[in-house]
Amino acid sequence: MDNRPGIFKWIEKFCASELVEGIMGDLDELYAEDKANLGPKRAKFRLYLRALTFLRPIFYKGFKPIQNPNMMIWIHYFRASWRSIKRYRQNSMINLIGLTLAITCALLMSLLVVDEYSFDKMHRKKENIFRLYKKNVNPVKGSSFFTAETSGLMGPEIVKNFPEATHFVRINPWFDDIVLSYEDRHFQTAEMIFADSSIFDVFDFKLLQGNPKTALKRPSSIVLTQTFAQKLFGEEDPINKTIKGINDLSFTVTGVVEDAPRTSHIQFEALVSWTTTTPGIGPLNYVWMNNWLSQSHYTYLLLSPGSDARQLAQKANSLIAINLAERKDNYFFHLQSLSDIHLKSDEILYTRKMKIGSHQFVLLLAFSGLLILIIASVNYINISLAKATKNIKEVGLRKVIGSSRRQVILRFLSETFMLTLMAVILSLILVYLLLPEFNVLIDKDIPFSSAFKPSIVTCLLGFLALISVVIDLYPAWVISAYSPAMILKGANRSIRVGSLRKILLGIQYTVSITLIICTLLIIRQIDYLKSQTLTIDGEKVMVINLNNEVGEHGTLLGNRLRAHSNITSASLCQAAVGGGTFSVMVIPSGQPQAVSTRIFRVDTHFAKTYGITILEGQYFRPDVRSDSNSVIVNEAFVKYMGWETALDKTIQFQEGGTKYPIMATVEDFHVSSPAKNLVSPGVMYLHEGNQNNLSIRLGQGNVEETLDFIQENWDALAERTPLSYSFVDEWYDRTLKAELRMVDTSVIFTIISILLCGLGLYGLSALMLEQKIKEISIRKVLGASVGALVAMTNRQFVLIILISFVIASAAAFWFNSSWIVRFPYQIDFDLSSYLLAGISSLLLSIGTVSLLAYRASVRNPAITLKDE
Amino acid sequence: MKGTHIGELEELILLTVATLYDDAYGIAIMREIETRTARKITISTVHAALKRLEDKGFVTSRYDGATKARGGRRKHLFQVSKAGQKALAKSREIRNGLWETIPKIAFKDG
């Protein structure tokens, strides 16, 4: 045949060799005929169709016959296992569900852990890159904290003075969203950062266009990420184009950089040259970014290989002694290696706009995953042991035919391996389906493709091998020990495993009840924290940020909005919940010591807008002139001073300054996360400058419609800034994000563990009752009531659960007392959580067992006893 | 050995193999059946049935008679075996028996 299609090769591979010649000959003959009658094209088509019909099982040459006896015995094991799995369908299902859940959990946890540890590993010089951070000590109070914020001069000075540091990179992620405009296209970015030109030397952020040496050298240079450049420029070449950015300044696009890798703790959409901010050089003239005093930038250092980071940090302290002598007792520098930044920064505060994970949270999740794995494994062991009685005849027969003990064990291990393999496959499917939800839950963006990373695949194979050996070795060991003579005589039909089964069940219950109690306590604690924020009726208050072109029209916007019937109050001032407040020292009248106080610059609508209760005195009135020279304090201030009342007191902002009378006390409310801070002493006064925030209280009416109204009014004033606002309750939830996340995850883990425990208990008691059915029947014949039989079956489980409850309570109490101290507001010891957990697990178990026991007890003894 | 039951198509093919005697290969069998029964049958179905018949021991096969149209390949030629003959005879017997026991009256209208 001239040009034979590839399908012939398939046939040659697929069909039995003794048929191939006949088949291909026939095909060729028919083809030749078709070609003559129909032409080559149609002939070929028909040949294809005809050839395809030969790919059916009957022609298949079959698998190579297996010659190796070892292989044959393994195939036999798997065949026997498959039959056994099918035969004990209920137990197999319970085991499969349990293992699948557990492996799914474990797999998700591994994905998380591997992902968290893979951060910042893409930089070639990662071994030698360090971030400067400092311990900020308050020698008077004796308190201290760590912060990653440094001054803008620290990096340059270190490199200038100490040769082991070869490069510095300063990074300042900008605080607000910035709109970048090219011609009539405007796009907002939350990830604009100021950075030194050396960023491309030190890190491996890849510049796709532009020169890495010079891109960020000159003032007013901007480098955009690929994605952002595409949004802003479309098909146009962005290089050397002029765009409008921060403060309406013009910037030249000098480069396009690859999007920041997902696993980089530094995230950006636009990089602006640091020189833009240098006074005298760049147009921004930000002294605070380039002096010793202001601490708000991140400094990265590249050290020459082999230099001592600890020593360099020591030397950095000497720079403070020289240049910022007044802080030499406050600041103590450290260097953190790049690979530690993402995960080991739990203690370091002020890591603005960086992707920082929580080591604690990762460990907690990994530990919970392990617990689930243990519970599921225990289920498996228990059910295998209980099932052993059924398998014992098989063991006897195998041994008579000549199986060694090892072979019997392998036979049972292969069954477990098969189930585990199925569970692994199901888990992969489940992980694929659940990963998006999981990502939301843990606030990450792990792609499913991570599941095929070598490290994860190793983990999976590890689970597979470990689980199938570990969980079945003991049951297989026990069952294979019996001598065939004894088994086949039928003398000993039930296997004794002593108290192991009870201990295992106890472990399971202990873990599960501990999880339940802890989860209940966590929920109550976080609820309590949330209730702390409700002193402000946050539900209907929104805050619009005016730190942009609309700022100058703030009053106009406020007045227009107040006209709407569903806007009950609007406050235009600097202070808002979620921003606009700051701390200064305040001297209360007649006190020698200044108090660190949070300042609220407000207007006359503030209290009404936020629904703040006035405890004594009167809030600022619009038409009373003297009010603008008075202040209002909060409860925390009064408490801190130990005053009875604040109304007859005054405060000063500096020694010898004006004394401002206090005209009211307001209740405490949070402007930071209630999980981290107590409400600090606060002072409010009327102030007309910096009116950056417009807080709006919405009424009971249609929110959508009101929002449309606000949008309309905004659009009338804003040319290129989109409306950005946040609701106060959502803001509070964000401050509690880590805590709320913990609630969600622990609830899920607890549900899974309860489910697994329930399944395990169901499987176990079903098997035990089946073995005991004769005992139950005889008792029944002798006159026992169904109730008594159910009670008898329950007795041993109840005891185990009670013991588990005691141990679990102790464990939960320990956990709770070590966890809860981290919060400034703590719930009291909560007995009801303990009782609820104990009673609910007891009732659930009794319910399960009773149902099964009842079914066994009502069976007719005549049937169950007939074969003896 | 697998079951020795013989299906309708198998019987038809077996008979055709016997008819064609020395030239019973795939295409010839297909043609013969097509002309005699006026029913369309694909070449792979013929091959499958032949394979089944051979597995049951009703036919034997050999390779012979290469032609140019076949790309120089030999034909896979089939012959009815002793067991095949018996199976055909048995099947015919059953049918004949049935035919003979049909009461005349049953077909009187037809």
Image (spheres, grey):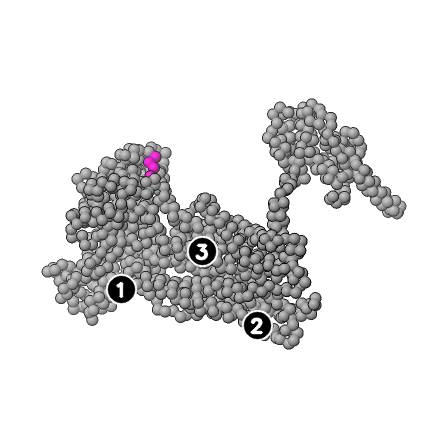
When asked about the image quadrant of residue B17, the answer is top right
Chain bearing tag 3 is A
Q: Are marks 2 and 1 in contact (CB under 8 Å)?
A: no
**For marks 1 and 3 on the same chain, the one whose residue lies earlier in the sequence:** 3
Residue tagged by mark 3?
A369
**Residue A44 occupies which quadrant of the picture?**
top right
Give the residue displayed 53% in from the left and 53% down from the top: A468
Q: Is residue A589 left or right of residue A521?
A: left
Residue neighbourhood size for the residue with mark 3, other residues' Cα within 10 Å, grouped as few (<14), some (14–19), many (≥20): many
Query: Is the residue marked by circle 1 packed among few (<14), some (14-19), or many (20+) residues within 10 Å?
Result: many
Disc 1 is placed on an element classified as loop
Q: Can residue A623 be seen from the camera position used here?
A: no
Find residue A792 and name its label. Answer: 2
Q: Which residues are magenta?
A: A204-208
Q: Quadrant of residue A27?
A: top right
* Chain to which the residue tagged by mark 1 belongs: A
Q: Amino acid at mark 2?
A: Met
